[in-house]
Image: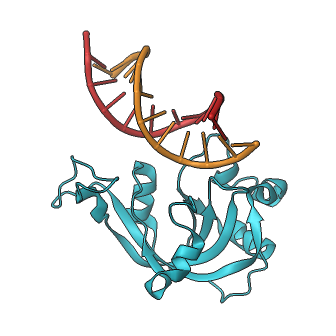
Chain colours: A cyan, B red, C orange
Amino acid sequence: MPKQRQYWLMKSEPDAFSWANLLESPAKTTFWDGVRNYQARNMMRDLMKKGDGVLFYHSRTKPPGVVGVAQVVKEGAPDPTQFDAKDKHFDIKAKPEEPRWYGVEIKAVAGLPRYVSLTDIKDNPELDEMPLVQRGQRLSVQPVSAAQWKVVLAMGGYKGRKI
DNA sequence: GCCAACGTTGGC
DNA sequence: GCCAACGTTGGC
């Protein structure tokens, strides 16, 4: 069976790490560290594959929304911040031989010519099933279906290469 | 800045 | 193994 490309949405508070920060990063890539939720970890460790598409979402900003498109370039690896006692995300129970937390590396592909706000997403009935708009959903990494991916990119006027 | 929703922790 | 307390997320 041919490998099916998967799609994801990743949230970041722009004060902590923004789309602009990603574009300024070496090779426009960053290791997605600091996630301390087991469901999100499992997705990064086990499910996200090289080449998968990522909607880069700005949270806790006015208005929140999808700002750009990225791609997974390196699959799940232990998050080094869990071992760094000086880091905010240090986890005393994590051991290098038995890591608890994982991240993936993503690379910016292209910004969306039109920002797709959370309100835009809520207003589009085709996106009713997105985890993002489900009540109480807080995961910072979420799956996106191929159909939802297409719709969001169309709303954003995406002109980058096909993922 | 508020607070609802939810995950985690830890006493029992 | 229950569940109250606590911490965090994130829209508003």
Residue B10 percent location from the top left of the image: 26, 25
Residue at (74% x, 69% y) in the render:
A152
Instruction: State the image quarter where residue A8 is shown.
Output: bottom right
How many numbered circles does the render carry? 0
Residue A126 percent location from the top left of the image: 80, 60
Residue at (15% x, 60% y) in the render:
A97
What is the residue that sits farthest to the left in this orientation? A97
Residue A27 visible from this viewpoint: yes
Residue A4 visible from this viewpoint: no
> Image height check: is A72 above or below C1?
below
Instruction: State the image quarter where residue A43 is shown.
Output: bottom left
Left or right of residue A122, residue A48 in this image: left
Left or right of residue A30, residue C9 in this image: right
Residue A55 percent location from the top left of the image: 62, 69
User: In the depicted view, which residue is nearer to us: C9 or C3?
Assistant: C9
Where's the C terminus of chain A, which quadrant?
bottom right
Residue A116 percent location from the top left of the image: 75, 66
Left or right of residue A147, residue A14 in this image: left
Residue at (42% x, 49% y) in the render:
A37
Left or right of residue A117, residue A12 in this image: left
Instruction: State the image quarter where residue A50 is shown.
Output: bottom left
